[in-house]
Amino acid sequence: MRAILRRFREWWQPPRKAGEGLEHRQVTFLELFYDLVYVVLIAELSHALAAHIGWVELGRFAFLFVVVWWAWLNGTTYHDIHGNNDIRTRVFTFLQMLSVVAMAIFAHDALGESSVGFALSYAGFQLILTYLWWRTGVHDPNHRILSRPYSATFLLNTLLFIASVFVPAPLRFILWGAALLLSLVLPVYIFSMGKKYPQAQAEIDIVSSVSPSLVERFGLFTIIVLGEVIVGVVAGVSEHHHLNGLVGGTAALGTMIAISLWWVYFVFISHRIPGPGTVVVSIWYYLHLPMTMGVATVGAAVLNVVEHAGEHLSPEVRWLLISGISVTLISIAILTRTIQLAREDQPVARKGRRSMLVSAALITLLGFSSLEIIPLLVSLVLLMLAPVFFAFQVWIERLDREP
């Protein structure tokens, strides 16, 4: 019996202590599988926006995207800091995935008829993370000073989402917003603890050290939302029963927008550790929210643009496409100020940052134009060439330095 218990403890380990990160850890297939579930969830949100484009619908999409992004962020950071290669980690990862699948089922009309199902699914996800963060303090007394406020906030969020099931709209969504606001300001409270308690600051310094594997996970999430632009192209083309050069050209230009955004992010930002300091790291974290949200809105807009190739472009679709690209470029430009760059890369990075901001400003001006689909897409691709050019220059110089 003792041998069985000893064997069980080997495979059911306590959460890894903060600061005991594995050197040169690679992203595992379990983490890739976990991210795959979010592909479906984000696709549901993006398709719901594409079906009904308007400022009210965009606000709903943004609210739900923040909920989803926060769920992914906490599941991802927990695994990166405390995850092990054992049965316990896999069981709780699969439980999180089941709750995310449930969220995806109800996501299409999460602020409508399926809001009860979405609320309970998200509450289940939060409850799992509440338990996980609480256990980190149980097994690591030094980390308890941070795990307690985290687990208490997650528990309160869980209760708010459960309570929202028993009240009608709009009070239901006010409770969601209150829970989400508590989550977003939680890191600010945690960082303020460091000024009062040296032990808290020591733990903050440990957990705010971003690992290369976590940087890679952020890149993978960016790939997920970029994939929605390609899905939008394919879905838009599939709506045409008779393909022609106009449809093909529109699809090609939509794909070029996705390629341009990919090139700029993954050359300037990806695989680069954020600079030291909790403030810089926090900015790095939170800037990925508007950046990925902007890419997701581009996907919804591209679907509409390709689907209605040859038709009149509505102002709502034009502004959705333009604002999505502009927000993405501005976010990436600011992100370049948060990462650690080699000295030889800094001059080109400054030029690239300025070109992104100028391109975003000029692209925004296109929203006031009356350009139709093809001229608008051509203009967007041309205006994105300058950031792509400087990203290309950074990439070439980096290849020249490599053996």
Image: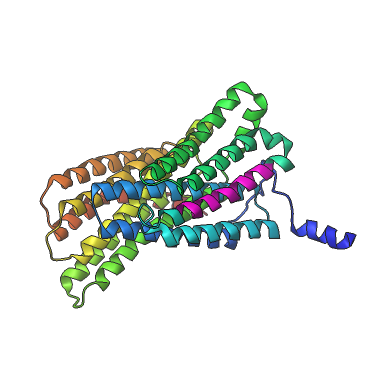
Describe residue 109's horizontal placement relative to residue 8 as left or right. left
Percent coordinates x, y for residue 258 in the rendering: 32, 58
* Magenta stretch bounds: 118-136
- Label total for image: 0
Describe residue 44's horizontal placement relative to residue 208 as left or right. left
> In front here: 10 or 250?
10
**Residue 380 shows up from this direction:** yes
> In front here: 152 or 19?
152
Residue shown at 21% from the left, 70% from the top: 248
Q: Is residue 337 shown above or below 306?
A: above
- Considering every residue shown, the one lying at the far top of the view is 196
- Considering every residue shown, the one lying at the far right of the view is 2
Residue shown at 31% from the left, 53% from the top: 297
- Considering every residue shown, the one lying at the far bottom of the view is 242
Residue shown at 58% from the left, 22% from the top: 195
Describe residue 296's horizontal placement relative to residue 276 as left or right. left
Q: Is residue 252 shown above or below 389?
A: below
Magenta stretch contains residue 135: yes
Percent coordinates x, y for residue 349 in the rendering: 38, 41
